[in-house]
């Protein structure tokens, strides 16, 4: 079972963010963050990825970039949570499930008040 945090905002569908290490953030770094709408961390990670080779000599620059990618793998999901909180969502619940759909259904069973807002958000284009 995987653990997910549920983030809620009035009149919006809840957002689920999985806990744990992110191999996508490790391999794709700023692109993974941008795909998860974490714009500010994506911009900072992209700038650091460009600046490290420009500011440091070759023995140090690949090590710094590798360290940045490992750090993004370890904290990528937390950066996504931070970005979601900046958009006004509050961390409300923790749910478990084998995948995101199962976790979302468990959340909606536990919180029936979210069903209407979730369905309205899914129906909107």
Image (cartoon, grey):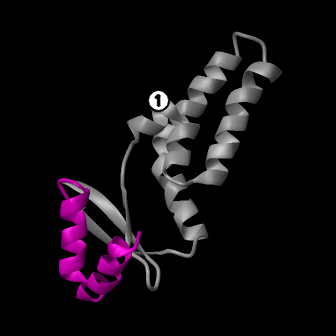
Residue in the image at 23% along x and 64% along y = 103
Residue in the image at 54% along x and 38% along y = 31
Magenta-colored span: 97-125
Outermost residue on the front side: it is: 125
Would you say residue 100 sits in the magenta stretch?
Answer: yes
Residue 96: percent from left, percent from top? 22, 62
Residue in the image at 65% along x and 39% along y = 45
Q: How many marks?
A: 1
Outermost residue on the right side: it is: 55
Visible residue check, residue 27:
yes
Visible residue check, residue 93:
no
Element class at badge 1: helix
Q: Is residue 122 above or below residue 54?
A: below
Q: Is residue 32 above or below residue 102?
A: above
Residue 123: percent from left, percent from top? 33, 74
Residue in the image at 36% along x and 65% along y = 5
Would you say residue 96 sits in the magenta stretch?
Answer: no
Residue 101: percent from left, percent from top? 22, 61
Quarter of the view holding residue 115: bottom left
Quadrant of the frame with the C terminus: bottom left
Q: Is residue 75 left or right of residue 121?
A: right
- Give the crowd class for mark 1: few <14, some 14-19, many >=20 residues within 10 Å: some
Look at mark 1 in the image and give the residue it sits on: 27
**What secondary structure do most residues of the magenta stretch adopt?**
helix
> In this view of the protein, which residue sits in the foreground, 37 or 86?
37
Q: Is residue 88 left or right of residue 44?
A: left
Quarter of the view holding residue 66: top right
Q: Is residue 120 above or below residue 98?
A: below
């Amino acid at each position: 079972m995987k653990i997910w945090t549920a983030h809620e905002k009035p009149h919006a569908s809840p957002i689920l963010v999985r806990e744990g290490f992110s191999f996508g953030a490790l391999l794709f770094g700023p692109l993974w963050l941008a795909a998860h709408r974490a714009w500010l961390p994506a911009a900072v990670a992209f700038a650091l990825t460009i600046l490290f080779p420009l500011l440091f000599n070759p023995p140090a620059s690949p090590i710094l970039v590798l360290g940045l990618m490992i750090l993004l793998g370890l904290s990528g999901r937390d950066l996504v949570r931070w970005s979601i909180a900046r958009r006004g969502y509050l961390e409300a619940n923790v749910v478990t499930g084998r995948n995101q759909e199962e976790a979302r259904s468990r959340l909606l069973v536990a919180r029936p008040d979210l069903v209407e807002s979730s369905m309205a958000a899914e129906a909107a284009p």
